[in-house]
Image: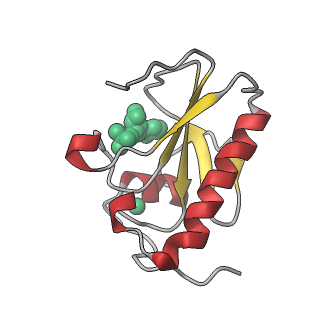
Amino acid sequence: MMKIPPGNLASSECLFCKIVAGDIPANRVYEDEFCIGFPDINPQAPTHLLIVPKHHITSIAKAEAGHAALLGSLMSAAAEIARGEKLSKGYRIVVNTGDDGGQTVNHLHLHLLGGRHMNWPPG
Ligand code: AMP
Ligand code: ZN
């Protein structure tokens, strides 16, 4: 069992906390002790899933050493989901952070994008 990391267990005003709680529906294609995965409502690629920790942390900018296990579990979940989605040609994991990073939902999440070639640099 992972030690409870710093931050709030849930925020009643947070969209992704509501999805984690089941108050807003989402098609959970993945779930484990630490996170859930579900399709982005506005997909930017043939496969576009969000991987969201059950624990509320606002963004990666708030990460501390105590979050290390949680953050690692998000990345390994992304890899497991990508294998399940058969993204054998590759994919991109994105963590938008803050205003300049284009973050719109203030609950940490990974975007898993695949099924098409990704450009670099990103917009
Ligand atoms: P970001 O802009 O990185 O904060 O990503 C937030 C993402 O959440 C956007 O790509 C939205 O399309 C997505 N989103 C917003 N509301 C929902 C929802 N109810 N279900 C699934 N995805 C959502
Ligand atoms: Zn939240």
- Location of the N terminus (image quadrant): bottom right
Relative to 18, say whether 83 is above or below. above
Give the residue furthest to the top: 116
Q: Which residue is drawn at 60% across and 56% down?
A: 74
Residue 102: give x, y in percent of width and height. Answer: 28, 39
Q: Quadrant of ligand 2?
A: bottom left
Residue 37: give x, y in percent of width and height. Answer: 61, 46
Q: Residue at x 64, y 61 (%)?
A: 73
What is the tally of numbered marks visible in this picture? 0
Residue 101's image quarter?
top left
Tell me the colour scheme of the image: secondary structure
Residue 2: give x, y in percent of width and height. Answer: 65, 79
Q: Residue at x 77, y 36 (%)?
A: 83
Kindly tell me whether residue 90 is visible in this rendering.
yes
Relative to 86, say whether 106 is above or below. below
Give the residue furthest to the bottom: 3
Q: Which of 22/61 is in front?
A: 61
Q: Which residue is drawn at 33% across and 61% down?
A: 61
Residue 14's image quarter?
bottom left
- Location of the C terminus (image quadrant): top left
Q: Which of 119/60 is in front?
A: 119
Kindly tell me whether residue 59 is visible in this rendering.
no
Q: Which of 35/66 is in front?
A: 66
